[in-house]
Image (spheres, grey):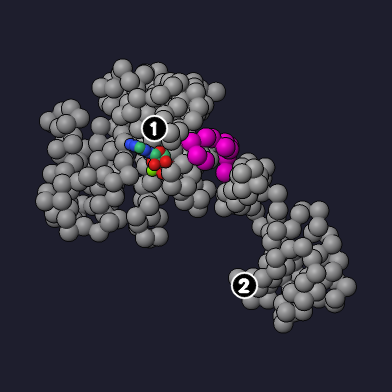
Amino acid sequence: MADPIIVTEGLTRRFGDTVAVDGLALEVYPGEVFGFLGHNGAGKTTTVRLLNGVLTPSDGHARILGLDPMTDGPALRRLTGVLTETPSLDERLTARVNLSIYADLYGVSKTEVKRRVDQLLAAFDLTERADDKVGEYSKGMKQRLALARTVIHQPTLLFLDEPTAALDPVAARQVHAMILSTAREGRTVFINTHNLVEAQRMCDRVGVMEHGRLVALGTPHELARSLARNVSVEFELAPGSAEQAMTALQAMPVQVSAGQRNGTVLVSGAEREAIPDLIDRLVSAHVRIYQVTPQEPTLEDVYFALHSDAEVKQ
Ligand SMILES: Nc1ncnc2c1ncn2[C@@H]1O[C@H](COP(=O)(O)OP(=O)(O)O)[C@@H](O)[C@H]1O
Ligand SMILES: [Mg+2]
């Protein structure tokens, strides 16, 4: 495997009595889309700020692309693009001018600027409105412009802090597609998010943060498998049998609800071993079953599994 592009060891940051990041040990590899997942206050933004040299660690260290963010800041900034939680664009200027200013700031050569800006406006679907003031843009357009700006100097590594948090689902989807296409150009992408669906859709691997600690790490699939102990199962039944099925399963230690599709019931909170018993019950009650489909556990299940653990420990 290639050398990691991000390595942290014992990375810690305290603010007074708060330990925002607590002994983080993490490796991120070239070409990965890595999701850093956690609720508000989990320590995601603080981590990214430590990785960018904006904050000094209280303890431990990080190396990014072989550089130390504290001492090699300028070299690192040429190789990384950062989308902060609330990116500031100049709303009085057009998208084209916003991008051109950044291109200059990042030392893109004069002859290159126009070509690069045109190319990014097209890639981020902003060409038509390129000469309108950014203040007139929708949230989704502003975020696409902010994203275009982070790649103006063709960085190797991108940090995106909650890139779709303020967007409606349609705009979020567009931004997802654009992030994935910039990743496919060979970039490594580190995404902070509290959105499980986003992480599951986009990320090769995810780390889950809680109170500054990394509590889980793996592919979305691995995490869902290892942590979600209880499974959900969808039963497709003969028409009109849903009610009968719900009555038959009443005494079982599971939650039963009408499924999303007509004629189905969804059983959740079942141990895998209990599935045959559920089927037995239904058959004994003369419920006719057409199909039994275990539902793939999601990161949401992982989250709840982690949370119920934390609650038990407290
Ligand atoms: N500059 C700061 N001063 C004091 N406390 C801070 C500061 N930045 C973050 N924190 C605290 O550190 C913890 C982690 O915050 P943050 O990294 O922003 O979490 P996240 O991005 O996961 O929502 C929170 O308890 C937050 O209040
Ligand atoms: Mg944050």
Q: What percent of the width, then of the height, locates residue 177?
A: 39, 49
Q: Amino acid type of disc 2?
A: Arg
Above or below, comparing residue 246 to residue 105 in the picture: below
Q: Position of 82 compared to 303: left or right?
A: left
The residue closer to the viewer here, 23 or 237, is 23
Q: On the image, numbered disc 1 is attached to which residue?
A: 16
What residue lies at 33% left-to-right and 20% top-to-bottom? 70
Question: Where are the magenta residues, as a range?
Answer: 210-220
Element on which disc 2 rests:
loop
Q: Is residue 218 magenta?
A: yes
Q: Position of 92 compared to 176: left or right?
A: left
Above or below, comparing residue 261 to residue 132 in the picture: below
Residue 261 numbered tag: 2
Q: Amino acid type of disc 1?
A: Gly
Q: What percent of the width, then of the height, locates residue 170?
A: 38, 60
Above or below, comparing residue 252 to residue 24 in the picture: below
What residue lies at 20% left-to-right and 30% top-to-bottom? 106
To which quarter of the image does residue 19 belong? top left
Prevailing secondary structure class for the magenta stretch in the rendered image: strand
Q: Is mark 1 within 8 Å of ligand 1?
A: yes
Q: Badge 2, how many Cα within 10 Å: few under 14, some, many 20+?
A: few
Q: How many marks?
A: 2
What residue lies at 37% left-to-right and 51% top-to-bottom? 164
Q: Position of 279 compared to 182: left or right?
A: right
Name the quarter where the N terminus is drawn.
Answer: top right
